[in-house]
Amino acid sequence: MSQTVEVPKNHVILNSISLFERSRSFLERHSQINLYLDRDTAGLKCSLAAKAISEKYNDVSGLYDGFKDLNDWHVSVT
């Protein structure tokens, strides 16, 4: 009989990308970091900068391409 080990997941909500640098030490303790930032100039720029820092960062905002942010997309599909 095989056992399944559940990997714990953390979620961090930054109410502003200005909090990104402050949260980096916590974020980078994880093996994978998915970014759901706004699809505006500032959010996309922050995603590019994060990906340049480490391969751990993954910009998944393409999920809601055509919308300003994850919340706008979520409201449109519910």
Image (tube, helix red, strand yellow):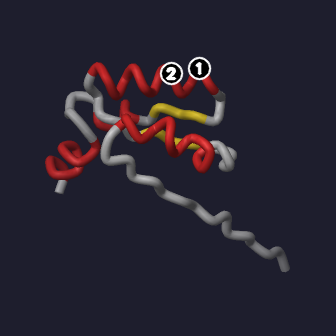
Label ID, residue 49: 2
User: Does the CB distance between marks 2 and 1 fall below 8 Å?
Assistant: yes
Q: Is 43 located above or below residue 28 in the figure?
A: above
Q: Where is residue 54 in the image (x, y as percent from the top left)?
A: 65, 28
Which residue occupies 64% across, 43% down?
28
Left or right: residue 19 versus residue 6 is: left
Res 66 quadrant in image: top left
Against 56, residue 44 (above or below) is above
Residue 63 occupies which quadrant of the picture? top left
Q: What secondary structure is found at the residue carrying circle 1?
A: helix
Residue with the mark numbered 1: 52
Q: Residue type at mark 1?
A: Ala
The crowding category of the residue bearing disc 2, from other C-alpha atoms within 10 Å (few below 14, some 14 to 19, many at least 20), is: few
In the image, residue 4 sits, relative to residue 30, either above or below, namely: below
Q: Is residue 25 left or right of residue 38?
A: right
Q: In this view, does 15 lie to the left or right of 10?
A: left
Measuring from the top left, give residue 26's x and y in whole percent: 60, 50
Q: Is mark 2 on a helix, strand or loop?
A: helix
Amino acid carrying mark 2 in the image: Ala
Real-space Cα separation, disc 2 to disc 1, in angstroms: 5 Å
Mark 1 burial class by Cα count in 10 Å: few <14, some 14-19, many 20+: few
Vertical side of 62 occupied by 12: above or below: below
Q: In the visual, does 2 lie left or right of 23?
A: right
Identify the residue at horizontal 67%, vertical 64% (top origin): 7
